[in-house]
Image (cartoon, rainbow, N blue to C red):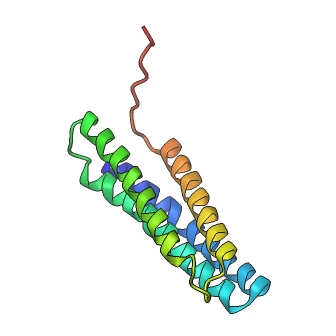
Amino acid sequence: MLDLANSMLRTALLPSAATVAAGVLVSTLWVGLPGLFGALVGGGLAVASCLLTILMMRKSAALMPALVMAVALGGYVFKLMVLMIVMTLLRGVEVLHPYALSLTLLAVILVWAGAEVVAYRKAKIPAIIPSGR
């Protein structure tokens, strides 16, 4: 599990940073400073959320599989609630362009998830697939 977390982190960091940079560039050209700030906040929130996933993987690596799944599900729900609260609090902030923030956040999360899939497929980790009986 720790090797997988390390592999996912290494694989996802560079593409995610490039996505944040692209979001900042496009948003700044699109709407100016509010786009810049919105994209930076959205990219930062997305990277923080994804890093929290890696941290949860590392901290739960030694637990029984059922507890790992509980941590994963609980962490997912926690992250969604925190993101919803933060996005609600940022809704009225004029200096942040809402579309730049949300589109950059979404793009970074999708790129990170894709990188995690690539890292998982390349990892030499045995997986048990039940026969379905």
Quadrant of the image occupied by residue 29 = bottom right
Q: What residue occupies the far top of the structure in this picture?
A: 133
Q: What residue occupies the far front of the structure in this picture?
A: 92
How many marks overall?
0
Quadrant of the image occupied by residue 94 = bottom right
Q: What residue occupies the far right of the structure in this picture?
A: 30
Residue at x 42% of width, y 40% of height: 124
Name the spot of residue 98 as percent of width and height, x first: 65, 75
Name the spot of residue 4 as percent of width and height, x first: 39, 49
Name the spot of residue 25 as percent of width and height, x first: 71, 82
Residue at x 27% of width, y 35% of height: 65
Q: What residue occupies the far bottom of the structure in this picture?
A: 33
Name the spot of residue 1 as percent of width and height, x first: 32, 46
Q: In which quadrant of the rendered image does the C terminus lie?
A: top left
- From what the image shows, is residue 39 above or below residue 125? below
Q: Quick one: 15 or 51, which is closer to the camera?
A: 51
Q: Position of 39 compared to 7: left or right?
A: right
- From what the image shows, is residue 61 above or below residue 6? above
Quadrant of the image occupied by residue 108 = bottom right
Residue at x 78% of width, y 83% of height: 30
Q: Quick one: 131 or 81, which is closer to the camera?
A: 81
